[in-house]
Image (spheres, helix red, strand yellow):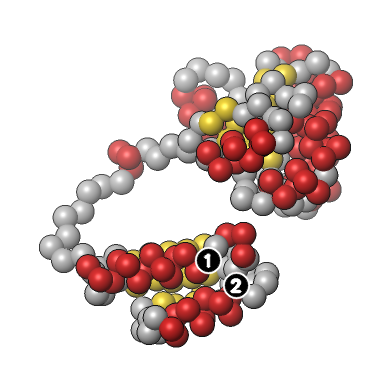
Amino acid sequence: MVLSSLLRREGYFVTVSSDKTNKVLRLLDMCFSLLKNRKKTDYVLIDTFSTTNFYYALIISQLSRIFKLKYIPILHGGNLPHRLGQNPFFSDLIFKNSYKNIAPSNYLKSAFEAKGYKTLFIPNVVEIENYNFKLRESLAPKLFWVRAFKEIYNPTLAIKVLNVLKKEYPNAKLCMVGPFVDNSYDDCVKLVSELKLENSVEFTEFF
């Protein structure tokens, strides 16, 4: 929604799809929206993820090709490189035929280029004017880690960062929240114990 509002602010006409929560209805809404607006569309921007939504990107990208529309996958998620290896045929259909592939991180850019997909790096933006400066006389950093407890996301790194911060800011705290996918949660609990950070790290149940 941020991207669409910024594009509109620049004078572009933008149609957004879909707000449906049901996955089937969402896909149908996206397809219908593309069919309905195909004659007045210059570019199709596709938020592309590694999970079920990957197949949304597959279907919408191929519909775009049928109607000779330029489409731009906007890459999201650290697990997308795994998807490239898992589904190389579908990945080629999407990313080798796109007008541009856009990555918000150099990590994804490097991973995609390693597979032969030309990728442009455009970092996410922060509208700094929306965040007021607050002068703090004493600093007590509060870190918030939100991710699945999975090895690929290296959750123990957050605990190591906290440990370094506490040398300068003894009151620093860390809250970690996310679903348990592999043994990474147990590794985090063990590391917290080894570093004696029990009073500084909170594991919040994922809902």
Work out whether 193 lies above or below 168: below
Amino acid type, mark 1: Pro
Tell me where residue 201 sits by quadrant. bottom left
Picture coordinates of residue 100 (x, y %)? Answer: 65, 24
Amino acid type, mark 2: Ser
Work out whether 22 lies above or below 151: above
Quarter placement of the C terminus: bottom right
* Residue nearest the viewer, comparing 199 with 156: 156
Picture coordinates of residue 1 (x, y %)? Answer: 55, 38
Estimate how packed mark 1 is, as few (under 14), some (14 to 19) or many (20 or more) residues with alpha carbons within 10 Å. many
Going from the N terminus, do you reach mark 2 or mark 1 first? 1
Query: Does residue 185 appear in the picture of this structure?
Result: yes
Picture coordinates of residue 28 (x, y %)? Answer: 83, 39
Name the side, left or right, on which 194 lies relative to 146: left
Work out whether 109 lies above or below 41: below
Residue at (77%, 46%) from the top-left corner?
A: 85
Name the side, left or right, on which 6 lies relative to 151: left
Mark 1, secondary structure of its residue: loop
The span from disc 2 to disc 1 (Cα, nearest Å) is 7 Å
Residue at (79%, 37%) from the top-left corner?
A: 91
Residue at (48%, 35%) from the top-left corner?
A: 123
| C-beta proximity under 8 Å, tags 2 and 1 | yes
Q: Which residue is mark 1?
A: 155
Q: Which residue is mark 2?
A: 184
